[in-house]
Image: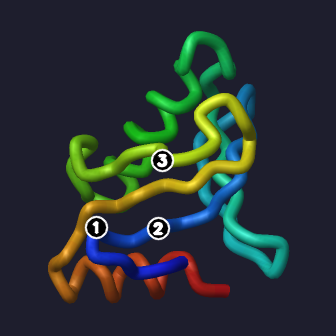
């Protein structure tokens, strides 16, 4: 996780076609399981929707900045509120 002038950058691995949506944090990194298939950007859209709901951040404030067609992604959270930044850091630290 890295804080920049644009917001918080987060490296994660997406696992599409999962039985349920969930976030796991371990020494191996952050993994997000998504039920959507990786076809026509459906998994990326589902990822943004899931993260938005789970983290209570508007979809418009979440963007895939790298790895659009890859399982390894870099996500930008455009959050600047100290409480939300602290929440993200706590949520994704292992």
Percent x, y of residue 36: 61, 23
The residue indicated by pointer 3 is: 65
| Circle on res. 28 | none
Q: Residue at 81% x, 81% y: name it.
A: 27
Q: Nearer the viewer, residue 65 or 43?
A: 65
Do the CB atoms of the residues marked 1 and 2 lie less than 8 Å apart? yes
Distance between mark 3 and mark 1 Cα atoms: 12 Å
SS under mark 3: strand
Percent x, y of residue 79: 24, 69
Q: Residue at 45% x, 28% y: name it.
A: 45
Percent x, y of residue 50: 44, 43
Q: Residue at 53% x, 66% y: name it.
A: 10
Above-or-below relation of 79 to 92: above
The residue indicated by pointer 1 is: 6
The residue indicated by pointer 2 is: 9
SS under mark 2: strand
């Amino acid at each position: 996780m890295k804080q920049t002038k644009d917001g918080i950058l987060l490296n994660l691995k997406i696992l599409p076609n999962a039985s349920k949506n969930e976030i796991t944090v371990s020494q191996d990194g952050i993994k997000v399981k998504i039920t959507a298939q990786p076809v026509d950007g459906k998994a990326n859209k589902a990822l943004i929707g899931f993260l938005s709901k789970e983290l209570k951040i508007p979809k418009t404030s979440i963007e895939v900045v790298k790895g659009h067609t890859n399982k390894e992604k870099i996500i930008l959270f455009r959050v600047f509120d100290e409480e939300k930044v602290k929440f993200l850091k706590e949520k994704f630290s292992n």
